[in-house]
Image: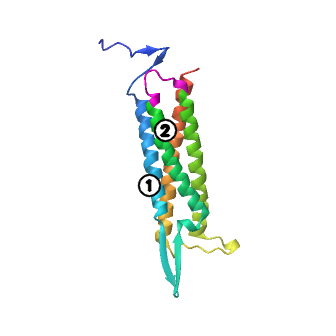
Amino acid sequence: MDPHSHPPQHNNIHYYPLNFFYFAQLTLRVLVIGFTLAAAITMTTSNQSVAFFGIVMDARYTYSSSFRFKMVADSLACGLSLLSIILLLSLNRPKSNPNNYFYLFLHDLVSAVLLLSGGSAAMAIGYVGRFGQPQTGWIPICDRVPKFCDKILVSIVASFLALICLLVLTIMSVHKLKSHPI
């Protein structure tokens, strides 16, 4: 094969079996799986019990509907990202239609919105837990259960890192669609 030859073309679309776009998509999807799995596991293991004047205070993620919603959102995004890898593998075949990246775009967009809503809900409750809200008489609890609050914070950060990866994936899918008009 001539070193100056061009890659095979089909319908004026270049197909590279193992190209940068594919590896970037795959890597980012694996990162999303890792971040969301870590976020869900960290959230489910966040609990701490402390005693004040003989009264035991138990802090668990299950006591807050926002934290439960975030854990479910992380789990769903992790599962959806596993499914998206299968879709990505099918789109990497030489005869696949590049317009099918629209489904990947929709998938990434839905996953990003899910993570954004779950992370935002948990962040709002976490903020009140860390700093309180004097106007309503809610006192901060993180000075009493720091291990619990730190795990919640790690879970929220992991979710937002996954969200950043999904936003990059969304932009990549849109770029792929734009570069291959219908």
Q: Residue furthest bottom?
A: 53
The quarter of the rendered structure image containing the N terminus is: top left
Q: Which residue is mark 2?
A: 84
Q: Is residue 93 rendered magenta in the image?
A: yes
Q: Amino acid at mark 1?
A: Ala
The quarter of the rendered structure image containing the C terminus is: top right
User: Percent x, y for residue 130?
Assistant: 56, 68
> What secondary structure is marked by label 2?
helix
User: Percent x, y for residue 167?
Assistant: 54, 41
* Picture layout, residue 16 above or below residue 79: above
Q: How is the image coloured?
A: rainbow
Going by the image, does 106 lie left or right of 150?
A: right
Q: Is residue 83 visible?
A: yes
- CA separation, marks 2 and 1? 18 Å
User: Percent x, y for residue 20?
Assistant: 41, 30
Q: Amino acid at mark 2?
A: Ser
Q: Which mark is residue 38?
A: 1
Q: Which residues are magenta?
A: 90-99
> What secondary structure is marked by label 1?
helix
How many marks can you see? Answer: 2
User: Percent x, y for residue 98?
Assistant: 51, 24
Q: Nearer the viewer, mark 2 or mark 1?
A: 2
**What residue is at 30 percent from the left and 11 percent from the top?**
2
**What residue is at 44 percent from the left and 55 percent from the top?**
38
Between 96 and 28, the one lying in front of the other is 96
Between 107 and 119, the one lying in front of the other is 107
* Picture layout, residue 79 above or below residue 19: below
**What residue is at 40 percent from the left and 15 percent from the top?**
8
Q: Is residue 166 rendered magenta in the image?
A: no
